[in-house]
Structures are given as C-alpha cells and as structure tokens.
Amino acid sequence: MSHPFLHLRTVIRHRHKVLLHCIRAGIGWQGLFHDLSKFSPTEFIPGAKFFQGNRSPNEQEREIYGFSAAWMHHKGRNKHHFEYWNDLNLQTHRYEPVKMPIRYVKEMFCDRVAASKIYRGSEYTDAHPYQYFSRGNARQKMHPDTADLLEEWLRMLAEQGEAATFAHIKSLDNRSDYGGEQ
C-alpha cells in the first residue's frame, strides 16, 4: 500500500532536521539543498510505495527486487553519501573509495544524526548514530580518512553531546584537508 503523504512528511521532517544541523555545522547553504532529489519521481514514488516509517523505504525495495532503483538514483546525485565518492583507480584498474571533501563529510554527519532522530523518535540518544555506524559495514566501503573523521565525530557526539560536537565541526575550515594526503 502506498503512503505518499506519510513519506512526504518524513522527507520534509528529515530535511528540516538536516538543515538545522547543517546551520550548526557551518554549512547552512548546503543544508537548504540537501536531498532535493527525493522529490523526483524516481525516488519519491518508490519511497511512498515502500514507506514503513521506521527505516528507509530503500531497504524494503532492495529486499523485494534485490536492489533499490531509488537509492541508485539518490547516491549518484548527492555528494554527502560516501557511495558517490568512488572512482576508477588507474593503478589498480578497480573502483575504489575516494576521500570526501570535508564539507560533504559534515553534511553526511548531519544527515546520519537527523536520520537517527527521525527513525528512532523518542528513543533517540546521541549514542545511536555511532552505534549504527559501528554495527554496519560502511567503514569498509569508505576512504579510510573519511571513515576515521566520521567515526571521530560520531564518537564525540556519543561522548560529549551535540553542543560540543557541532561547535568542533563548525570550527573546521570547509576547504581544509584532513587525515593525511589527498
């Protein structure tokens, strides 16, 4: 059964939280444009069709079809997803993770925290985004420097809370390098 209004409400609530987090992280302009592709028919229609309210609709689409067309569309258009940052390594002739620019790592952090808040609701704690990251296999698919930075911020959130973490993230220059050579 399709749930277009519930899906729309969830997308809007999520974008609003991401925007607020992006402002706190010093990338407010980016937050205004966060996840606009979710309103495209390629993403919105499956999102409404597979809406459940407690997890991404892409997960159910993937369970049914073996892949998510909506996710394939989304990750290819949104630079705050580490999956966007894969390219052909000319030495190995394999697609490998590329180190993400820090401004997109900031947006990825904001996105993950907002998603945890939306899907966990009143059960959310500042430890949830770190726990979700630790349970998953995203680290193995990211550039090591990107994974280290994201994990550092998620751990900081769990241990020191939002105020300290967002202040730290905001203090970092959006043009800076991190974690060694690029």
Image (cartoon, rainbow, N blue to C red):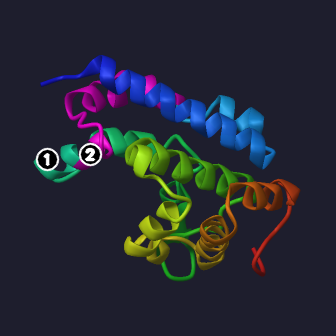
Q: Position of residue 164 (x, y in %)?
A: 77, 61
> Mostly what secondary structure, the magenta segment?
helix
User: Which quarter of the picture shows residue 57?
Assistant: top left
Farthest residue to the top: give it.
5
Of residues 92 and 42, which is closer to you in this image? 42
In the image, what residue occupies the spot 28% across and 24% down?
A: 45
Please provide the residue range marked out in magenta: 36-59
In the image, what residue occupies the spot 85% across and 60% down?
A: 172
Q: Which residue is mark 2?
A: 68
Secondary structure, mark 1, is helix
Q: Is residue 143 above or below residue 79?
A: below
Q: Position of residue 83 (x, y in %)?
A: 48, 58
Q: Which labelled disc corresponds to residue 10?
A: none
In the image, what residue occupies the spot 21% across and 50% down?
A: 62
Give the quadrant of the N terminus.
top left
Q: Is residue 153 left or right of residue 27?
A: left
Secondary structure, mark 2, is loop
In the image, what residue occupies the spot 67% across and 43% down?
A: 21
Farthest residue to the front: give it.
122
- Crowd class of label 2 (few under 14; some 14 to 19; many from 20; radius 10 Å): some
Q: Is residue 86 left or right of residue 100?
A: left
Give the quadrant of the C terminus.
bottom right
Q: Mark 2 near mark 1, Cβ–Cβ under 8 Å? A: yes
What residue type is disc 2 on? Ser
Q: Is residue 94 left or right of residue 87?
A: left
Q: Position of residue 116 (x, y in %)?
A: 46, 51
What residue type is disc 1 on? Tyr
Of residues 168 and 159, which is closer to you in this image? 159
- C-alpha gap between disc 2 and disc 1: 7 Å
Q: Which labelled disc corresponds to residue 65?
A: 1
Q: Position of residue 134 (x, y in %)?
A: 45, 74
User: Which quarter of the picture shows residue 29?
Assistant: top right
